[in-house]
Image (cartoon, rainbow, N blue to C red):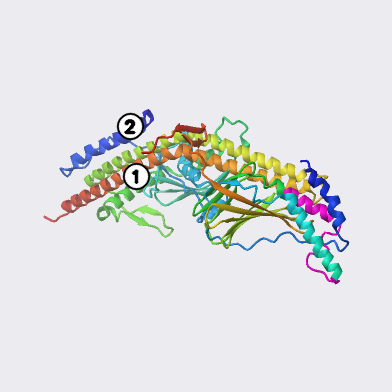
């Protein structure tokens, strides 16, 4: 994958804005405490609202501005705040930029198809695996294989998918549906033990009604997709 | 439609036979005596009950274990047929039947639980008990489909062969007297279940829980002859049920075989990939975009494989569900019918026994 021109320019620009200080990598995002009580209904088709969703470059600049501002204030006051001095070197800046690139690459889906019932939810994403969760027990559902670990469940009215990957890399998707049920917000946070701060991208999706197909299709093992013309409803 | 009428044929025949019997029964009669053949005690009749699918209690455990319950349930009734085929082909046994529920009066009853079935490994816990209560087998059989290089060979053939051979080995270790005793006790247990007032005291339980014959009915015992006739009719029903299962097996065999092949391919592929991932050396520095992207892609790839498997499982269910539901419906009908007939036969036989034992 090649960097976008903005990504390529950013390290130099940001390094210049960074102040000297301690270079502390933060621990990756902690696994959230989740429960498994089914709340909102996410069922439906959702398309990305570009206007409301975050632009990765803008968010990255904002993040650096915020951090450098906090470092400058700390330097002026002779105090250290939680984030002061975090982006202290070009290496640390690059780590945050890499997180942003990863966040951007895993949030490219523009359309989501969600099937949600009392027992399970399946969030189908274009060009990526579906996020799935079962609500069979009160405990959050978790699964692991040699490549990573997944935990999902509810944090209040938000549905959280947390993925723990090697080298302290974590990805979390926090989904919230608006009370009107017409908008969906997903905050995707990527964190790494090698980056000083996590990076979050907010995406907003609008509900849309899919055009009803003229065919009823069923997937079968031996004949693959079998479709028959849909009967007109009375 | 043709398939449907083919499926219905044996059931319809059985129902006709029974309705004929029901008409005859209005006069308080029992079925006409079947032609009894001399039995060679080596050829015991075997009843294979549908397997326990071995599903974990909680849905979350089923999901975590990667078990597809619909497929496991189909396997529970499909796999005994493969074993039956082996046993019939060996010509070592009498009638081998597959039934929905265990029959403790059977000459030899084989029970089983699916412990693992993932396309690559099949593990079954098998227990076999004869009518005397003697345990023939109680062990686990396991086999890997990776031992079969040809995709045209039914996988796990060795596993069924091992079970069949283990049963034959036990039978060969029994004397003719012991084998005869199994047949007699099977017959007496059936009679005692049907008319306990008459035959309840013919068997005695020994300290180890097994049964022995305390006394035998006379060779010309008319009540026993009637009991045997009822049993023959029950067997006719059982054979109809068995036929239903066999047809179900024929219907789903191709789909099941494809499922096993796909599942095996995915498992093999995952195992190879895992090995490659372990041995892969990377130059991307830890925490770099390339390294993080690789971690994410590996996880994504494993999830996509998992989800492909789920889609195939759904495709399998979509394809066989209609047949399974249809057959199960007919089985409920048949067994329900048998249960009510059985109660009626029980009532008639008891009445006969009471009449015959009235003091003049």
Residue at mark 1 to residue at mark 2: CA–CA distance:
17 Å
Tell me whether circle 1 and circle 2 mark residues in contact (CB < 8 Å): no
Which comes sooner in the sequence, label 1 or label 2?
2
Question: Dot 1: few (<14), some (14–19), or many (≥20) neighbours within 10 Å?
Answer: few
Q: Residue furthest front?
A: A51
Residue sitting nearer the eye, A16 or B57: A16
Residue sitting nearer the eye, B134 or A59: A59
Q: Which residue is mark 1?
A: B332
- Percent position (x, y) of residue A71? 83, 64
The N terminus of chain A appears in which quarter of the rendering? Answer: top right
Residue A25 shows up from this direction: no
Q: Is residue B235 magenta?
A: no
The C terminus of chain A appears in which quarter of the rendering? Answer: top left
- Percent position (x, y) of residue A221? 52, 35
Q: Is residue B173 above or below residue A176?
A: above
Element class at badge 2: helix
Report the chain holding disc 1: B
Q: Is residue B37 left or right of residue B261?
A: left
- Percent position (x, y) of residue B257? 53, 35
Report the chain holding disc 2: B
Question: Dot 2: few (<14), some (14–19), or many (≥20) neighbours within 10 Å?
Answer: few
Q: Is residue B304 left or right of residue A79?
A: left
Q: Which residue is painted at 49% across and 42% down in the image? A: B75
Q: Is residue B99 above or below residue A121?
A: above
Residue sitting nearer the eye, B348 or B256: B256
Residue sitting nearer the eye, B94 or A138: A138
- Residue B9 is marked as 2
Start-end of magenta stretch? A77-102
Q: Which residue is painted at 83% across and 45% down in the image? A: B283
Q: Is residue B323 left or right of residue A12?
A: left
Q: Which residue is painted at 56% across and 38% down in the image? A: B260
């Amino acid at each position: 994958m090649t960097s976008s021109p903005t990504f390529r320019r950013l390290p130099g620009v940001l390094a210049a804005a960074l102040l000297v200080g301690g270079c502390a990598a933060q621990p990756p995002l902690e696994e959230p405490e989740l429960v498994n009580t089914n709340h909102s209904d996410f069922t439906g088709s959702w398309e990305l609202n570009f206007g409301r969703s975050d632009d990765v470059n803008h968010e990255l600049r904002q993040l650096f501005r915020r951090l450098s501002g906090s470092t400058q204030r700390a330097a002026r006051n002779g105090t250290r705040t939680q984030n002061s001095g975090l982006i202290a070197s070009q290496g640390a800046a690059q780590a945050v930029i890499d997180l942003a690139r990863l966040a951007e690459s895993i949030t490219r889906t523009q359309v989501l198809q969600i099937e949600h019932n009392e027992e399970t939810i399946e969030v189908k994403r274009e060009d990526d695996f579906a996020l799935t969760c079962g609500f069979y027990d009160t405990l959050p559902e978790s699964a692991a294989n040699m490549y990573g670990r997944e935990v999902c469940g509810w944090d209040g009215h938000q549905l959280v998918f947390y993925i723990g990957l090697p080298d302290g890399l974590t990805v979390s998707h926090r989904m919230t549906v608006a009370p009107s049920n017409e908008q969906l917000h997903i905050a995707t946070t990527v964190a790494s033990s090698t980056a000083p701060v996590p990076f979050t991208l907010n995406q907003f999706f609008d509900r849309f009604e899919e055009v009803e197909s003229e065919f009823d299709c069923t997937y079968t093992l031996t004949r693959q997709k079998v479709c028959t013309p849909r009967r007109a409803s009375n | 439609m043709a398939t449907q009428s083919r499926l219905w044929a044996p059931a319809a025949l059985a129902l006709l036979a029974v309705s004929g019997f029901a008409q005859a029964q209005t006069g308080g009669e029992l079925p006409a005596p079947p032609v009894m053949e001399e039995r060679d005690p080596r050829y015991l009749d075997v009843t294979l009950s549908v397997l326990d699918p071995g599903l974990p209690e909680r849905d979350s455990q089923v999901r975590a274990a990667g078990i597809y319950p619909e497929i496991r349930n189909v396997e529970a009734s499909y796999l005994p047929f493969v074993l039956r085929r082996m046993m019939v082909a060996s010509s070592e046994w009498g009638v081998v039947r597959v039934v929905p529920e265990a029959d403790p009066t059977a000459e030899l009853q084989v029970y089983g639980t699916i412990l693992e079935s993932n396309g690559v490994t099949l593990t079954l816990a098998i227990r076999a008990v004869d009518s005397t209560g003697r345990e023939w087998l109680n062990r686990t059989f396991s086999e890997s489909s990776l031992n079969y290089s040809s995709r045209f060979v039914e996988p796990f053939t060795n596993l069924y062969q091992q079970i069949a051979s283990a049963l034959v080995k036990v039978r060969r270790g029994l004397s003719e007297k012991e084998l005869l005793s199994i047949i007699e006790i099977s017959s007496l247990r059936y009679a005692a279940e049907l008319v306990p007032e008459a035959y309840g005291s013919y068997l005695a339980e020994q300290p180890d829980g097994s049964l022995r014959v305390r006394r035998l009915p006379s060779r010309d015992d008319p009540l026993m002859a009637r009991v045997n006739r009822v049993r023959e009719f029950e067997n006719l029903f059982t054979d109809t049920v068995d036929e239903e299962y066999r047809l179900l097996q024929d219907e789903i065999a191709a789909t099941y075989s494809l499922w096993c092949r796909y599942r095996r391919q995915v498992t093999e592929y995952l195992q190879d990939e895992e090995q490659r991932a372990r041995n892969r050396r990377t130059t991307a520095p830890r925490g770099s975009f390339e390294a993080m992207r690789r971690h994410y892609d590996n996880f994504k790839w494993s999830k996509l494989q998992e989800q492909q498997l789920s889609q195939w499982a759904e495709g399998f269910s979509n394809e066989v569900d209609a047949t399974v539901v249809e057959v199960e419906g007919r089985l409920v009908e048949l067994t329900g019918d048998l249960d009510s007939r059985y109660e009626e036969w029980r009532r008639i036989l008891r009445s006969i026994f009471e009449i015959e034992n009235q003091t003049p």
